[in-house]
Amino acid sequence: MHSLNVVWAVFAKDLRVEWRSRETLAPMCVFGLLVVFLFNFAFETAHEETLRLLPGLLWIAFAFSGILGFNRSFAAERENGCMEGMALAPVDPSAIFVGKLMANLVFLGVTEAVIVFAAAIWYNFSFLPSLGWLALIVFFGTLGYAALGTIFGAIAANTRMREVMLPVMQFPVAFWILILAVDATSDALRNAASSEISQGLFRVAGISVIFAAVSFLLFEYVLEE
Amino acid sequence: MPLAATRANQALELFNVSKYFGDLEALKGVRFQVARGDSVLLFGPNGAGKTTLLRTLAALSHPSEGEVRYGGQDFYKDPQTAKAAIGFVSHVTFLYGELTARENLRFNGKLFGLHSLEEKIDRALELFAMQDRGNEPIRQLSRGLQQRASLARAFLHDPDFLLLDEPFTGLDARATDNLQSILCHLPEQGKAVVFSVHDFELGASMAHRLVALERGSVRYDGELKDAPLQTLGIKK
């Protein structure tokens, strides 16, 4: 019960800090929109080409916006030694991880919704026929990606070149989630057979759950000095 | 064994602790024990190892060699019980700038699983004369007020062991007197306090025991009144 209270306290604290500072969500959304906007000008595409490019474009925008968010998430913890302040408390470090992960999921989820909406307008593409599948694929892909961002963000926060270190550490590992997510998103957007889409979804969900579980178990060691 | 007797036996201990930062040996085979009711002044020049010793006791820093013990057991076998008994004040405040002092205390209280939290927050803020400034964001407060909020955070869960690293930093004369008075009375309440200050006279007015550190080693550990202050280079 105490662990659940800690999860909620960390999550609510992160949302409150963001509500006051507005330093995480706004840059994430603006960056994501810029990626979609620039790609729109770089590749003037017909519908068929859009179908080919859009899955990769979306996940690139999600991934880079996410990196910005994970860096900001731990910048607030680094200030005044707040991460150490949490480590002083008699709590299961995994509860802190889950609270931080939930906050990162909310920030990245909102950003992804904004990016998808902007892509629909700028590429004149309707996501409605595949929205259910897309939502599931994005949810599981984001879960794994945000879990990695949470643990690598905490590790990078203790390094000197933290802004550089986070993407350098995260992308080689998150590569596998991104590849599978792009593949599954592509199937969903071109309205492939349900069995084909669900196979892709299971692969994304599987690898994301594994990465999330490993991050959950290892966070204790990251919180230590 | 009754719970009260068990608690009475509980002590925080560093057993042959060494701590390395690269080639630098910040602590060298330190043996140090603090029990409830103790009032210990850590004194030494810059770089003597005071902060490292306090951080190791608070489990923020793992020893490279040796063991940290709580109640005779390895601290890390049951860290949650040990952490619940410790309040720590550091050079940094451990407070979120965007949140108010009250919100910071509420967050910490939830991490410690405290009951009657609002009452405890009121009491902690009142103890450090912060009740009028409790609803202002930490970022807007002066360094002294931030330090008072940080002290309130450390006292919030009524810990048995208070580890205070330069607790007077930034405090004005009135706040210094107030903290001095609080620290003087802690041993009577069965609390242990271990603190470092740069002003020896100020520290000596509150402590019964002196631990003099130099280059990571304990040069003296004993009654303050018996300490060879000249030999230790504290007084000329």
Image (spheres, rainbow, N blue to C red):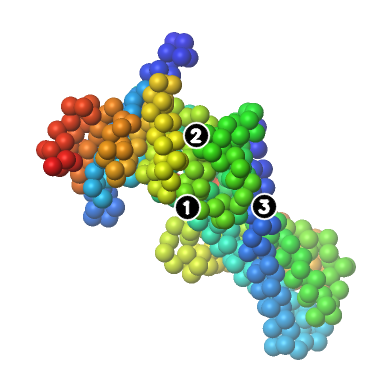
Number of numbered discs on residues? 3
Q: Is residue B215 above or below residue A131?
A: above
Observer-nearest of B199 and B186? B199
Q: Which mark is residue A16?
A: 3
Q: Is residue A64 above or below residue B116?
A: below
**Residue drawn at (74%, 84%), measured in percent from left and top?**
A40
Query: SS for tag 1?
Result: helix
Amino acid bearing label 1:
Arg
**Residue drawn at (44%, 57%), measured in percent from left and top?**
A158
Image location of residue A83, percent across then percent down: 50, 49
Q: Quadrant of the N terminus of chain A?
A: top right
Q: CA distance from mark 1 to mark 2?
A: 18 Å
Observer-nearest of B223 and B129? B129
Using residue B170 as the reference point, say whether residue A126 is left or right of it. Answer: right
Whether the residues at callouts 1 and 2 have beta carbons within 8 Å, the answer is: no
Discs 3 and 2 share one subunit = no
Mark 2, residue position? B155
* Chain at tag 3: A
Q: CA distance from mark 3 to mark 2?
A: 24 Å
Q: CA distance from mark 1 to mark 3?
A: 23 Å
Discs 1 and 2 share one subunit = yes
Quarter of the image where one finds residue B17: top left
Given the current orientation, which residue lies at the most extreme top position? B1
The label nearer to you, 3 versus 2, is 2
* Chain at tag 2: B
Given the current orientation, which residue lies at the most extreme front position? B174
Mark 1, residue position? B143
Image location of residue B180, percent across then percent down: 39, 34
Discs 1 and 3 share one subunit = no
Amino acid bearing label 3:
Arg
